[in-house]
């Protein structure tokens, strides 16, 4: 009976997740599509140019289906999206889905390394700051975090390039890899570090690593500042609970109490914080990609917007929405993995 009840609850929860995710994605697509149709940019002119004849303009508008009503256009677009057709990019003349599959791995690679750096450094720093509230480790973490929040990311990027690339020559310059290495690797996953390691192309690996160190460190610093700040707050809240005092009375040392008893209780909210940070970085980290000429999703969407390439903007927005929804669903699944009370709920 208990097993049947658990299965029923699990099925109901999964169905709820999927329904909620589908409705969120539908709403995002609808809102983005409508906004794209009402912004003062003419997608026909973006294709035919300013010097096209009236006849060419009208034929192109008809071919794009812009003579139909907005609801009709949306339903047609939605039908294509459900079949994996996100339209064709005006800039590249390629299918938008193909472009996104080309650009997204670069953002995935950059955001993943930045998030790993943020978690590895930000979580311990936040716990130590919370456990040492009001003392010098707390002040150091807060100052470092405040600096990360205060400094514009493009300024840090430019200063980083000036110092570590221009003056010290410790890292490689803008771009994802030097031009001489671009044709030495057959893309498999699209993530150069993984592809080069799988192929044993260590020269390519080192060159890609030299390029990603600086932008990933800057984004990782931003992620660290956010994660450390939230971890500090969660830790302070847990250390004010009675169970921590009980643990100390029973003879546990202070730091053993922090890591064994307080830390596990901040994991659930911490998963949300890390998930949101990762999703934000995956959204494109537009300024960082622009400063470092990083060929990722953010740079692609920005250039598409400047060129009125609405199919590319819509496709990129849908991908960002899928990423956000996917990370939220994954975070919810992780809640249940780390907290048995939620599994029983």
Image (spheres, grey):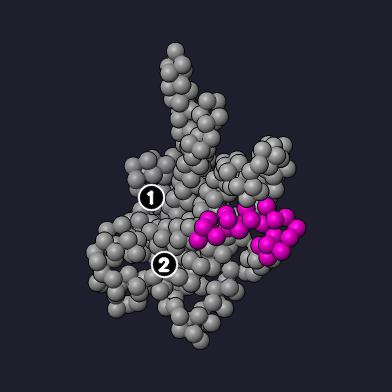
Quadrant assignment, res 163: bottom right
Work out whether residue 191 or residue 104 is closer to the camera in this orientation and state it.
Answer: 191
The relative height of residue 313 versus residue 344 in the rendered view (above or below) is below
Quadrant containing the N terminus is top left
Quadrant containing the C terminus is top right
Disc 2 packing (10 Å; few <14; some 14–19; many ≥20): some
Residue 295's disc number = 2
Residue 278's disc number = none
Q: Position of residue 236 (x, y in %)?
A: 70, 48
Residue 299 in the figure: left or right of residue 236: left
Residue 86's disc number = 1
In the image, is residue 67 part of the stretch drawn in magenta? Answer: no
The span from disc 2 to disc 1 (Cα, nearest Å) is: 20 Å
| Region of the chain picked out in magenta, as a range | 117-141
Disc 1 packing (10 Å; few <14; some 14–19; many ≥20): many
Work out whether residue 132 or residue 8 is closer to the camera in this orientation and state it.
Answer: 132
Which residue: 66% across, 42% down?
A: 251
The relative height of residue 201 versus residue 318 in the rendered view (above or below) is below
Q: Position of residue 292 (x, y in %)?
A: 47, 73
In the image, is residue 128 part of the stretch drawn in magenta? Answer: yes
> Magenta region, mostly helix, strand or loop?
helix
Q: Is residue 43 visible?
A: no
Q: Residue furthest bottom?
A: 167
Which residue: 49% across, 69% down?
A: 215
Residue 255 in the figure: left or right of residue 296: right
């Amino acid at each position: 009976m208990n097993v049947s009840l658990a299965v029923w609850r699990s099925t109901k929860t999964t169905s709820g997740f999927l329904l909620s995710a589908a409705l969120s994605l539908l709403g995002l697509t609808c809102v983005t599509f409508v906004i794209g149709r009402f912004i003062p940019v003419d997608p026909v002119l973006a294709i035919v140019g300013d010097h096209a004849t009236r006849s060419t303009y009208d034929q192109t508008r008809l071919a794009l289906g812009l003579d139909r009503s907005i609801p009709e256009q949306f339903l047609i677009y939605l039908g294509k999206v459900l079949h994996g057709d996100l339209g064709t990019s005006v800039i590249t003349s390629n299918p938008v889905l193909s472009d996104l599959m080309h650009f997204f791995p670069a953002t995935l690679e950059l955001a993943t390394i930045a998030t790993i750096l943020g978690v590895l450094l930000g979580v311990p720093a936040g716990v130590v700051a919370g456990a040492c509230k009001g003392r010098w480790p707390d002040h150091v973490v807060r100052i470092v975090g405040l600096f990360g929040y205060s400094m514009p990311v493009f300024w840090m990027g430019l200063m980083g390039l000036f110092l570590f690339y221009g003056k010290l020559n410790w890292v490689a310059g803008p771009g994802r890899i030097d031009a001489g290495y671009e044709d030495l690797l057959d893309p498999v996953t699209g993530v150069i570090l993984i592809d080069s390691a799988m192929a044993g192309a260590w020269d390519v690996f080192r060159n890609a690593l030299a390029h990603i160190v600086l932008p990933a460190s800057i984004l990782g610093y931003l992620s660290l500042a956010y994660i450390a700040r939230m971890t500090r707050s969660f830790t302070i809240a847990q250390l004010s609970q009675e169970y921590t005092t009980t643990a100390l009375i029973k003879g546990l040392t202070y730091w053993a109490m922090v890591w064994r008893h307080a830390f596990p209780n901040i994991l659930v909210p911490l998963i949300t914080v890390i998930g949101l940070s990762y999703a934000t970085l995956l959204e494109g980290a537009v300024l960082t990609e622009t400063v470092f000429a990083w060929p990722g999703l953010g740079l692609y969407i920005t250039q598409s917007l400047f060129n009125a390439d609405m199919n590319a903007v819509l496709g990129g927005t849908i991908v960002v929405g899928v990423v956000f929804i996917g990370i939220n669903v994954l975070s919810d699944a992780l809640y249940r993995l780390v907290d048995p009370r939620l599994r029983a709920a």
